[in-house]
Every structure is written in structure tokens, then in C-alpha cells.
Amino acid sequence: MNLKIDSFKTYKEEYQKSVEKPEEFWSTIADKFIWKEKWSQVLNWTFDDSKNEKAPLIEWFKDGKLNITENILEKNIQDNPNRIAFYWEPNNPNDEAKTITYIELYHQVCQFANGLKKLGIQKGDRICVYMPMVLESVVAILACARIGAVHSIVFAGFSSHALADRINDAEAKIVITSNKLYRGEKVVELKELVDEAIQNCPTIQNSIVLNLENNTSEKDLDFHELMKNESTECPAEKMDSEDYLFILYTSGSTGKPKGVVHTCGGYMVYTTYSFQNVFQYDTNDIFWCTADIGWITGHSYIVYGPLLSGATSIMFEGIPTFPNAGRFWQIIDKYKVNQFYTAPTAIRSLMSFDEKFVKESDLSSLKVIGSVGEPINEEAYNWYYKNIGKNNCPIVDTWWQTETGGIMLSGLGDLSPMKATYAGLPLPGIQPVLLDAEGIEIREADKEGYLCVKFPWPSMLRTTYGDHERCKLTYFSHYKNFYFTGDGAKRDENGLYRIIGRVDDVINVSGHRFGTAEIEDAINKNEYAIESAVVGFPHEIKGQAIYAFVVVNDFEKEKSFIQKSITKTIEEEIGKIAKPDKIQIVSGLPKTRSGKIMRRILRKIAEGEKQNFGDTSTLLDPNLLEEIINNSL
């Protein structure tokens, strides 16, 4: 199935069509997929709750019936059953690499799906997946989709407490995990973390464990034993286009993670379309996205987008610096990778190593290199283009979100204009706008504004699981009739967008979004913490790092002792990925007389500013500010 635009001229024509006649545009694309029943209406929508109490209401391909796995499995085994779906590269390069073809994937998905059905799993049940980057994780995800179960993947770097929170919110019946996870020289005992988590998860009926070594409960089942004697055929459940496909939890402005919901039909259409166009994927190309499946990038551009396109991809279990800093480049050469998609954090990290690690590899197979997760700075962009792209390979600097489901702003391979630090133009079907604080559209070039979208696209979130009001308040209440991204941006004279960064209380650490409230909530559970405020500050590798200001109840104790204790609490509550780089013990937080914490001042202090804090006349205790500045880290 080829959905590719083949020239910049065609892009402009397609974009115009998608804006003038969006329903006709998306209907033509959706027609190329396998549907069990045709839709009755292409789009039914309103962002405005004064028009419909269910708003935001977004329904794409209304009443259409399908199963997304038929478009991955049946379609591709009919065309080319022995095409390789994935090359799997292990954490340790001395271990055996593996492959799985589309026909093998079909059989294994059906067997695992039949195993889940024997456990009583039905359409609509939620299943939590807490897995390493192994082929079995894809089998598990697609098996859920095959029978209509809703998968909720939790990144395997989250703590047992964070896992339990997500299981309980989704009311998952089963958790699928692995005995261990290998990451560089580290071995993580995943099964132990799951055992700890599900002690507080009453809805869990079974743990399915890859490479199960020790049964700690009658709930434990071995992954391969579950599917061992099952049939390699399993009928695909008929799903409505708007039935839930998955829930993916992301941090928000409150302490509780929010479950972003994506549905079957629109997500299928948009991820396929965006994958083929952004990366200009051709049949027989080798695609590699280095993300983890626990993040939306892994969902959309490791699992669904590539597989729906019949692509051959790399799945990598390890890290870019193990056993040395040449690992990425060695893998590109080994498999002759054509499209490579990674994060600015990884690029900045690899820049710091000796250039010999790059020079030892050829990299001439690359046709497109991509960036994802956060805005890429100019230095990293130029290094990436020169050293990895050999000054000849287009960079697609993609902007999108968990909530958008797919890439929104980007170049299209080598078809579009490139400009360092600019994500680029909107994909067809995406109608971005910049608004000022009053909601007035900014039309002039090079003026910063709030990035919003004024018309629905097929893969956008439908709700936040179990709390539709939260979805409305977070994304649709700031500006009437617009989806609010939470990002600031500007647009140049040619219409290229540059993302400035978050404008809400979210910190982007190595491409991972954390709500400040979630981290503060974890800190405040520490026995020494009374109150805390968390902000982001610039970091040369991570992009942003976390700076915590903490009021404690015992100033006699060593600061280093309390800082270590707080760090441990955060790791237990959320995971090591949320660990602050700096924890400053303070006697109080700068607040207005109404009790509001002055976060803009704390951000400036975290960035190293010692003066120029603007109007501080509303501060309850101005002397406190001087104390915090003098003791800043």
C-alpha cells in the first residue's frame, strides 16, 4: 500500500486538498485499508462543550468496522509472507540476533491471542505490558489488538509504584512482563518489580512472564507456555473505528498520570500515512527507530506505522554507548539501514565521544535521518547532518505528542525545505495556528505564540481514560474551538514552524515528559519534605533537567543525607528517569500573598540568574528570595 507523496509540488497540492476538503481527503486514504464494514460518516466532531456536553467529541470513519491486525498480518502475508518484519538486535552484540517474518509474526500473534482468550480475556478488557525491547513485546501488543483487548504499555524504566498506579487506573486484568531486562551492563529484575506492584492491584488476575524462572504466585504463567499448544489461526475481532486500541499514560499538570486514549480506525490511517511520507519509505528499505515501545514513538513508529506499511524494521534492546559509543553506527552498517530515527539526547551524548566511533562506520546506506522527542539544538543538528548524514542526508526534525498519535510538523524526506532547529511544515490534514494570550491568531512571521490546532486529524486523542473532563480541561479549555498543545512556537516567512518549548508545567527530560506536580507529589511523600517546587533548567545532554526546591522539617540533618533520601523516594515512586539533577534545601518557597508559588522566579534561579526577576512586589517574604539565590546550586 503506497500512500507516499513524491514531490514538494504534490505536497502543496495535497495539503491544499486536505484543508479545503478534509473529509474527502481522508476518505480516499482510508479506502486503501481493509475494512469489514464501510463507515457511514467520515467525521463527526466538536471541540466546544456549549454545543455538545460530550465535547471534545471526535469520531473518524463513524460506524466503520475493522481490525488493525488484519491490515498488518493478513494483508502482508498475502503480499509477501516471508518478508522480514523485524531484525532484533540484542543488548550484547555477542548474543544471537533474531529475525521474524510476517508469516511468523501472524502465527505467534494468533497463538498468544488464543492463549489470552483461554484466560477469559474479552474485547474491551485492559492488559498492561511492562516489557523490554524484545520481539515478544510486539507479539503481545498485536495479540491484544487481535481480540479487541486494550493494551496499556508502561515503560520498563518506571518504578513498581508508578506501574501499580497505571494498572489500577486502567483496571487491567493481566500484566505481561519479562523475568529480566538487560540495558548496557545493568540487569533489571522486572519480575520482582511486577510482583511488588501487583500486591496493590486487585484487578490483576494473571502475570504472564517471558523467561519465567521463579513462580512466586499461582497467578504466574510462562509467556511461551501460554501459546505453546495454541492454534496458529485466530479470527480477528470486529472493532468499531472508535473502539479503544490503547491507553498510554503520560505526565500532566496534576500528580496523577493521565491515560491518553487512541482508537482503532483513525490511528491506523494516520500513523501509516505519516510514516510513509515523513520517512519516504520505499519497499525493501530498512527502517530503524531507536525509541522504546513504552513511549508513543515506539507505538507509532516501531509497531503500528511500519507494520501497517509492510516495512522491515530494526528492534534494538540495548543502549547507544554499550559496549562502546559506536553501537548505533555499527548496527546501521550491519543491516544497511535506510531511515534512522532517534532523539536529540542520544545525539548530544554521542557527540561527546571520540569521532573515531563514527568514522569506523560507513553509513552510506542512510537516506533519511530523523529527530524526535524534543526540539533539537543547532549544534546537535549540524553535527548529525555532517557526521551521520555526510552532508547529504535530509534531517526530518519531527514534532508531535503522545496526544497527537502521529507526526504533525516535519519535512518529508528529501522533498521539503530544511532549516536547523525548525520542525518544518505541517503534514497534510494538520491545521496549526499560533495564538496570543487572548486567543487572537498571530499571522506575522517570527512572532512567538501558543501552538494550537484548529481542525481534527484522525489520530488525535479521544479522551483521557475514565476522566473525560480532564481531557477537556487540559487540551480544549484554554482556547475555544482549538486543541492546545502546551507548546510555544514561532513560524518563519516560509511557514516553517520552530518549537520553543513547553509553556505549561511539564518538563521534557531526554524526550520524556514529566508533570512538575507528579514529581512534587513524589517528593512530598518523603519523611523529611514539607513542601516542594520543581522546575526545568537547560542541560547540554538531556535538553532539560529537573531542579527541585524542597522545604524540609529537619535542618539539623546533613543536606546530602536528605537529598539522597528524596532521590530514593522519587526513584521508588516514579523511577530513576525522574531523578532531579539538583535538589536545593530551602527554608521556604517564594510565594505571593495569595499563596501562589512564583515558579517563573525559580526557573530563573535554576538557570543561573542572580537578578532581573521582574516584579517581585507581590512576594510574601522578599528576604526569602535572596536566601534562595545565595544558596542556589
Image: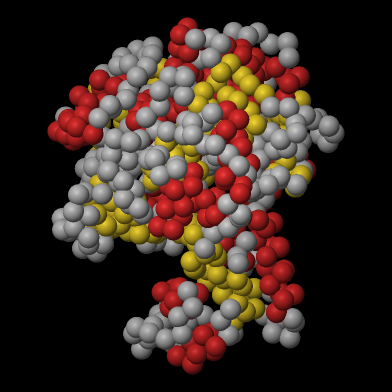
**Which corner quadrant of the image does residue 173 belong to?**
top right
Q: Position of residue 278 (x, y in %)?
A: 36, 34
Rendered residue at 65%/31% (across/down): 89
Q: Quadrant of the N terminus?
A: top left
227 with respect to 477 (left or right): right
**Which corner quadrant of the image does residue 282 belong to?**
top left
**Which corner quadrant of the image does residue 44 belong to?**
top left
Count of numbered badges drawn on the protein: 0
385 with respect to 212 (left or right): left
Relative to 349, say whether 30 is above or below: above
Q: Position of residue 461 (x, y in %)?
A: 39, 39
Q: Position of residue 81 (x, y in %)?
A: 53, 9
Relative to 349, say whether 163 is above or below: above
Q: Position of residue 500 (x, y in %)?
A: 35, 59
Rendered residue at 49%/78% (across/down): 608
Say which of 21 and 92 sits in front: 92
Say which of 494 and 392 sits in front: 392
Relative to 424, say whether 255 is above or below: below
Rendered residue at 63%/16% (across/down): 108
Tell me if I can see residue 587 in this picture: yes
Relative to 339, say whether 186 is above or below: below
